[in-house]
Image (cartoon, helix red, strand yellow):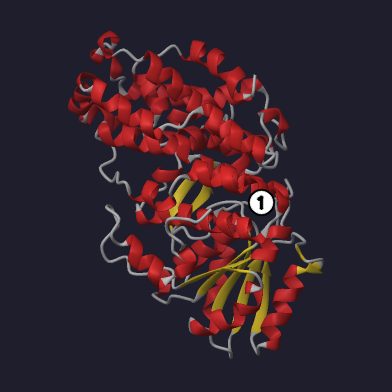
Amino acid sequence: MNLTYDPAENERFWKSIESIPGYPAHEEMPIRKMIFEAGAIWQIPDVLLSLGADPEQPVLVVMDPTLMRREGADLKALIRNILVQAGLQPEALVLQPDATGQVHTDMPHIEVVQDQLASVGAVLSVGSGVVTDIAKHGCYLYQQATGRQVPFVVFQTANSVSAYTSNMAPTFVDGVKRTLASRYPDALICDLETLRDAPYEMTVAGVGDLLAAFVSFPDWYLAHILGLDPGYSPLPKELMGPIDEIFLAEAEGIRAGDLKSVAVLAKLIALGGLAMSLAHATTPMSGYEHVISHILDLINEQSGRPLAFHGTQVALATLLGTETYRHFLAEFEPAEVSVESCYPSADTMHQRIQEAFCTLDPSGRAGEECWSDYQQKLEAWHAHRAEFQAFLAGWPQVKPQLEELAQPTEKAQQILEQIRSPRSFAELNPPFSEDQVRFAFLNAPLMRKRLTIGDLLIFTSWDRDQLWRAIWPVSQGG
């Protein structure tokens, strides 16, 4: 299925999206080259040189220790040979995993990259989302400190997340995921054979990461109509097109590893990253479903367990979010809301956050990190009381807008079934119990400054225990 906007068209692509309402002024082709082709791996040297890489200086190749294959060959060795044969000097920087066996996006890893940049002519990241984010943010911090923009190329190794075209980096701070301002890559290279040969679980995760839009789009509109997000625009939805139709059309090809479908998914993932970057926020692709996922990550981080595939976890949290919207849109009665009781004090919410998160981190650091973000939302919620009252009065007009943006659970489940995705939290690796997911569902709104449907449930004193009992079986395919 053809995309409305094709990032492979590069200059033509950037020109075409400038006319979409909400496109930011002065964003002129921030990524200079995006390639989605069979055999694109052989273009790495030309892309680096076109960006100003100095052949007399090393190319810092950032990667992790994971063995990757392309058509049976060692992918990283192949890239090294391609660089050497082109007269370039690859210098490998292998990021080391922690006790869980995984590399996480955190400041120690980012600083390792930053410390290497004074003596290199360019940076090439070879990896999935974590490696990309670490390299990206290391380059960003180096530029902030020195004023020098090192040429940075992303070689995407899996259709797994939307990090590759994003100018933001989700980073662990005191065990809590925070999204930090970062930088765009100068070029993105998607070699279709590499993406096809990546573990299929990562491809499934890439689809799941984009399904977040089924919840994040209505969440973003909700925050906007309540006065807490003035940046709302139709740009991300228009840019990405009919996600549901695209996935249903391409599901068979994605499963089979058809290069055309692999390219469509890679392009859609690139559009997802750009949707956030051009909106100057992760909000378009990250709502209630992502904060639920972040709480699950926090649970694993604090217990020393590895993290599940991000996108697959997000997809399952998306089912919780779509079911939440189904019940809210069917049952919300503005006349039953006591406005006075919708405004808890800072002391009340601070204590509530500390009590919730001390069960995961008795030191209190995670709770304080959550409070530092949440209190901004609470202050804004109090400051925009008039917008909430207008929301209640205008519910007959607001409701249809939310209904249009909130996709039905059945459609998300259909897509997950067709791409052979895990359908329950028990199928994740590592798995989660119902109690753990319930904890994440109830406490996710307390983690961030971003307002979602989860916050409105808390502020309006919704019976969330009853809601949980209704949505859990459905979200798990029951």
Task: Pick the residue in front: 303 or 476.
Answer: 476
How many numbered marks have been drawn onto this rendered protein structure? 1
The answer to whether one can see residue 92 in this image is yes
Q: Residue at x 31, y 12 (%)?
A: 333
What residue is pinned by disc 1? 253
Residue 159: image location, x then y, percent:
61, 55
Mark 1, Cα crowd under 10 Å, few <14 / some 14-19 / many 20+, is some
Residue 12: image location, x then y, percent:
39, 70
In the rendered image, the quadrant that contains the C terminus is top right
Residue 2: image location, x then y, percent:
50, 56
Instruction: State which quadrant residue 394 falls in.
Output: top left
Q: Amino acid at mark 1?
A: Gly
Q: Residue at x 64, y 86 (%)?
A: 88
Q: Residue furthest right?
A: 72
Q: Residue at x 43, y 75 (%)?
A: 149
Is 128 on the left or on the right of 185, as rendered? right
Q: Residue furthest top?
A: 336
Q: Is residue 245 above or below residue 279?
A: above
Q: Is residue 40 above or below residue 54?
A: above
Instruction: State which quadrant residue 100 falls in.
Output: top right
